[in-house]
Amino acid sequence: MSRHGDVAGADAFHAWCARVVGDRAGQVDALVSRAERGEVVSAAEMLPTRFTLDGVDGDDDWWDFQLDGYGTWLWALREHVVRHGGAVAGVEKGVRTAARYLTAFWQVPCYDWWEEHVEHRHVATLGSIHAGLRAAIALGVLSATESAAAAEAVEGIAGLVEREGLAQEGHLRKWLGSDAVDGSLLACVEPFGLYPAGHPVGEATVAEVERQLARDGGVYRYLDDTFYGGGRWVLLAGFLGWNHARAGRRDEAVRYLEWMAAQATPRVTCPSRCRACCWPPTGGRSGWTGGARWPRRCCGRTACT
C-alpha cells in the first residue's frame, strides 16, 4: 500500500499494528521482568504470531512463536514514514513495546519464517530483528535507555551473525551452525541491509541462494523442503529480483518479475507458490511421497512420484 501510494491505507494498517502491540505492553513488561530474574519463559507465553482483526490473539491450531514479524513491522513503519514524509499518529506505544520485546528476546530460538524449527536461531529472523530495532531507534520515539538497549542488541546481532552465521564459503547460513541456505536469507541483504548489496557477504548470499534454489524464474524455500512437494515461491522470486535490481542487474530483476506475473490466475490472484514443479531441487522425495501430508500428486500438471 505504501509503495503504491495509498498513504491513508498504510497509515491505518500501521496504526492498527501499533494498537495491537501496544495493548500488550503490560505482558511484555512482565515477560522481560521474569527473564531478567532468570526465569525461563516458554514459547507458549510469548507474544502471538497471529491476531484477529479486532486485535485479540489468534486461536489457530498452529505453532505460534515468531520474532521476525515484529521486526519486519518496525522496519516497514519506518520505511513508510520516510517514503511519505509524515509520522503515523499514535504509534509510539506500539513501537516502544515491540522494541522492548525484541531487545529482550532476540537471542531466544523461535520458529522461522516458515513456522518451522523452533529449536534454532535463524539468520533471517535475526536480520528482521536487526532491521526492526534500527528502525525503532531511527523513529525517535524510544527513551534514551530504550534506545541504548536497542542499539546494544543491534550490535549483538551483527556480532553473533558474523561469528556463527557465516558459512566457510562466505554466505549467510539458514540457522546458526548450519551450512544450508534458505530463500528467506535474501531479505538480510535487500531490503533489511544486515549485509547490504555490494558487501561480499551479501553478494555471496544472493549468489548461493540463486545457485541452489532458483529454477526457471521461481525460488524454492530450501533444498529439503517437503511442504506439499516444495514448490517455488512467488514471494522469494520477488526478493531475488529485488536484490538484482538493487545491485544494478535490471535484466535479471525483470526476469523474476515476469515469472511472478505469469503465476497470476485468470481472476488476477496470485498464489503463494507455484506447484507446477513440486519436488525439492535435490529430488529427495522419500520424506513425503505416499504420506498423508505429502500427496503423491500435488497439482494438476505435474506428478510428484
Image (cartoon, rainbow, N blue to C red):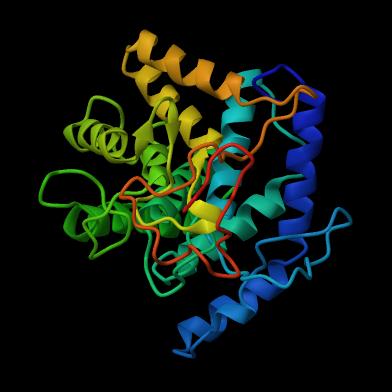
Q: Is residue 211 visible?
A: yes
Residue 122: x and y in percent read 38, 60
Q: Quadrant of residue 214?
A: top left
Would residue 247 appear left or right of 264 to someone viewing this image?
left
In which quadrant of the rendered image does the N terminus lie? top right
Q: Quadrant of residue 21?
A: bottom right
Q: Is residue 143 visible?
A: no
Residue 269: x and y in percent read 74, 29
Q: Residue at x 72, y 45 (%)?
A: 91
Along the line of sight, which residue is nearer the eye, 30 or 291?
Answer: 291
Where 131 sits versus 34, above or below? above
Residue 273: x and y in percent read 57, 40
Residue 117: x and y in percent read 44, 69
Q: Residue at x 39, y 68 (%)?
A: 107
Residue furthest to the top in view is 251
Along the line of sight, which residue is nearer the eye, 255 or 42?
Answer: 255
Where 240 sits versus 129, above or below? above
